[in-house]
Amino acid sequence: MSTTVVETHRPIWRRLIGFNLLTGIVFGVVGYYIGWFIGHHITGASVAYFSGIDQNDISVTLGYLLGVGGFLIGLGFGVYPWARIRGYPPSLREKETQGASRYFGLCTDHKVVGIQYMIGIGLFFFIGGLNAMLIRVELLRPASQVFPAGQYLTLVGMHGTMMMGIMTSAILGPFANYFVPLMIGARRMAFPRIESLTFWLLMAAGAILTTTIFFGGFPTGWTGYEPLNSQANTGMDSYLVFFALVGISMCLLGLNMLATIITMRAPGLTWSRLPIFCWGVVSTAILNLLAAPVLIAVLGMAVFDRTVQTTFFNPQGGGSPYLYQNLFWVFGHPEVYILALPGMGIVLEILPVFARKPLWGYRLAVSGLLGVTLLSWLVWQHHLFVSGINSDLRPFYMLSTELISIPTGFTFLCGLMTLWRGQIRFSVPLLFSLAWFFNFLIGGLSGVFLSDVPSDVTTHGSFFSMAHFHYTIMGGLVFAFFAAIYFWAPKMFGYTLNERLGKIHFWVMFISFNSTFAPLFAIGFLGQPRRTVTYAQHLQFLNDWVSISAFILGGSMLIFLYNFVYSLLFARIRAPQNPWSSVSLEWQLPTPVPLHNFDRIPVITGEPYGYGSPGIAAIPAAGPAGGSA
Amino acid sequence: MSSQPRSVEGGPAHGRRFLTAWLVLSLILSPLVAIYLGPAIPPGNGSVEATGQVFDNEVLVTFATPICIFVVLFLLYAVFSFRSRTVEIVDGPPVRGDSRIQIAWMVVTTVAVLALAAFGSYELLVDGAGGGQGPNAAFLPAGHSQAMDVQVIGQQWEFTYRYPTLGGLETPHLMLPANTLIRLHVTSLDAIHSFWAYQLGVKADANPGTDNIVYVTTKGPRSFDIHCAELCGLWHGYMFDTGQVVEQSAFTAWAKQQQTYFAPVAKYLPAYSTTYLPDPQRRAG
Amino acid sequence: MTEFAAHETDYEVVEGEPAELLGRNLNSAGHLLASATAFFFLAFLFAYFYLRSLNNAGLWHPKHVSPPVTLGTLVMALTVLSATLVRLGVADQRAARRPEWRLKAAIALAVGIGAIVVQVVAWTTMGFGPADGGYASVFFGWTAFNILFIVGALYWLENLLATAIRYRNVPVGADPKPGHASGDPGRPGHDIGNPLSLVRPGLEALSFYWTFLAGLGVLAWVVLYLL
């Protein structure tokens, strides 16, 4: 393998009309109208079936699908397939030469894709968070004040759907893409173009979801339960297309991660020497790969029910709403572990660096991750305890759900014992990692309540469930997300994030997060159902407390945003190559990381996390010569 | 935890210190939680099933207390005791694990989980715990064959109630006799709703085409809040009501009064059935 | 940020990566895709048995719904035939009998397209529609997605066949002209060394996947037509 230097001087006008985001958007809009026109034409032509139903569902759905197709072609994803159809040989790398404009289109450099993901996910996280702020504004008063009932439900649905769809890739997208090849000693991901595809699919999906407001929104919340799903008007289609695209993106992302880690590890990097973050990625990727197809299938069924009048979920037509619930949660439960597992991988990766000790109980931690992966397939009916499913099955699902706390507990043991008798050095990533343990503890324990069927009868469908999953998902994943950003920003961007601002961000976020979500347990116990725009008068004080805390929580994100923009665009303080003195492989590379990552692929000769052992250099000498990670 | 394979030279016995502190705090706080926090946990004692749920939640919250204390105390202890006190970076001891601790942890967590699952199953077995059990309820309270049937019909966006024992009378408000075992049949006419009678500790999804059975044993007279607990469309947030538990005599009197009141429209109602399919479209072939 | 943006006029490119690396990737991908596909159709399998057991409103399988058994069997047989031909083509390709493998691949492609055509004919002549009850819904959904996946597999096959045809006169191990397929016309060389050698691992991965998909098709046939 060699690298050469090429001259590519392309004038601005050529860069603008070349395949990029701009042409992507243009082609996307054109594609939308073509699809809409075709759909209109199909239903206009008299097929006896379609009379009497809302014909626009077909137009809108086809419009979205062809719009996404146009978007991808406009980005340049059609160039390679077109060449391959004509028989040209395979190639892996595209558009890696074009400077800043690499970030605005298809680029096969996994480091570019990682940064694209970070910005893209940040954007949709912001939109979803804004929806949450609006929800809490509405809930300041018991009666509907600001948003009429339909708009409120759309806000609730958009918040949940945006978060669940976008944040599934919150860690795998930016950090796994950027660092997995670096941690395993590879020069690329297994399928770089597909990697870029997963990113742009996610972006298209997010854009589609935001267009729901133009079609009247959707009333089902993020779970999209039938038969309300089929009843809803055309705004529902954007939900279905969004989630289907997210599903495709997730499946391909999981495939790529697994193919990379399975086939591209450096010599000497056996499975038992793989960094725990990569194990977190593996376990998440397995769930991504296998659960997302079930989601796509059930959403496909829902689309068919809404367009061509199949009766999958219509009990009057031979179908059943339980089919939707079961299939959705067969996906849905692994989905929430897709959200939780990367966080576990991140905190277990970060703790050794700041405790200056190896990860305690490496094999136990790996078993914990894989145990969660396996068990997550066996618990889904705990979402359906009171729904009228076969009541004999409930003790089994209660047991299986409670069993999941055992492998989760392994994560806790390994993380806590890593700290024990360490030489702990405080930093913002460490603070977020420690907070992860606290938050996930509360989240996990409340999950035990919900897994217990009698207790679930009290709390199902109430704000208690909401508190539980916000503690695990936001308290777990989002805190881990920030831990990862603060930890890896010096390598990704080359500049240090301001530590003082980081600590302020952490404390404001941690305190306001707990202040927001802890009272929700009480609110749920006191009888407020989810997704309601009104509530009982006596709950107003608690709701106001929660809303004010939520506003502060939102404000803490702005502190982060300010830190991010200020540090990277204005202060621009160069980060040292290895600011945390980590012995992990990615920190042995120079900043910025060269296009090919490694001059020579290292040979791994020892265990990871060599802290405290003699002969392991924390700060590297010149160049990434073969040494243990 | 009292000795490490390769321990730091000297230094206090951190493990023993930590475990002692944890034990002491747990022994103090758990009973406090059980005695003071426990009984305050909703939904209260409005029915036998609700009382069961309160007990269940009490046990869980008492159980969760020492676990919480363990993790929080551990984090605080570790963060304070094991702070690096040097400016230059010094590594900690290269301890990669301790199989005794791992095994102990695995055993303790497994036993705890199995005990919880057994406890929960037992509570469920006793009377169904007020949760919807579908058409073939498996957890039947004693005396269930003499239970009084009441149907709850959810529709967008209101609950109505039918009494098969009163000739299929349908009323917009729920009235139940006190100290009676009642078998509720929850169903829906359109989307999925969920019948949540808060003080009675009853929650059962209303699924179209399904008869979701839930048992509740009422106690003394009281009123109770009813909310819809499953998002069912536009006015889901307004789908609430208040029900009453009244003495048997008051209930009979009320029933008679309702039957007379609704007599003119009774003939338009469909026959009582455990499910209703209001629009049996036959699709074009 | 300029280091990360790099100058427009010079930047490094990666070239000549050993082809066997992508070969390993493809092998892995074939298996991973197969497992994802299995889980996808598992959802329909679940739907079939679940709705059949519930038989809501008695409309699981109304009397007038009679599945197109002959045409459906033909679709299944054609996909199996296509997969078999690809398997035999793999053996030919490995033994460097290039014209034979190209012929088998071409026939397999045609047969696969034939399966799609037959399925479309079945849909238009089957005498019931997707709205005719639970079975009809599952039937329609399952066969529709089956065809979609078959299109994908055939597209993959076409890519391999087209490469084989385009370079049929190039001796084994030779390099094609630079600048093709990568979308970077200014590239001096290929980012993969000896990319034509990737036809074999690509074909082996496709063969695995296509056989798997045909197997899922047989399962669909058993469930939809025989049960």
Image (tube, grey):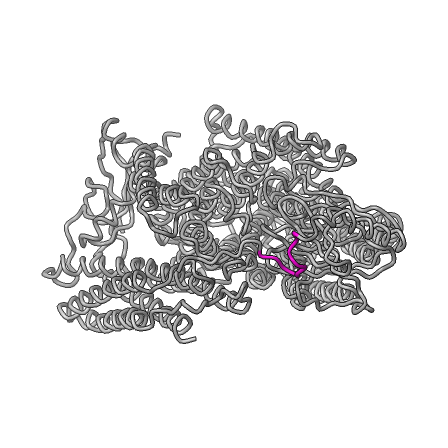
Q: Which image quadrant is residue A100 in?
A: top left
Left or right side of C179 for C46: right
Asked if residue C75 is positioned above or below residue A565 in the image, the reply reads: below
Q: Residue C3 in the image: x percent, y percent? A: 37, 32
Report the residue that reaches farthest toward the bottom.
Answer: C226
Report the residue that reaches farthest toward the top.
Answer: A570
- Closest to the observer, A510 or A550: A550
Asked if residue B81 is positioned above or below residue A207 in the image, the reply reads: below
- Closest to the observer, B134 or A382: B134
How many numbered marks appear?
0
Q: Specify start and end residues of the magenta stretch as a single range.
A: B268-277
Q: Is residue B158 visible?
A: yes
Left or right side of A482 for B151: right
Q: Residue A129 in the image: x percent, y percent? A: 56, 35
Indicate whether residue C79 is drawn in magenta.
Answer: no
Q: Please report the residue visible at 42 percent of the width from the left and 47 percent of the height from the top.
A: A245
Q: Residue B284 in the image: x percent, y percent? A: 41, 57
Q: Main secondary structure of the magenta part?
A: loop
Indicate whether residue B276 is drawn in magenta.
Answer: yes
Q: Is residue B82 visible?
A: no
- Closest to the observer, B143 or A485: B143
Report the residue that reaches farthest toward the left.
Answer: C169
Q: Please report the residue visible at 46 percent of the width from the left and 62 percent of the height from the top.
A: C133
Q: Residue B233 in the image: x percent, y percent? A: 59, 43
- Closest to the observer, A60 or A332: A60
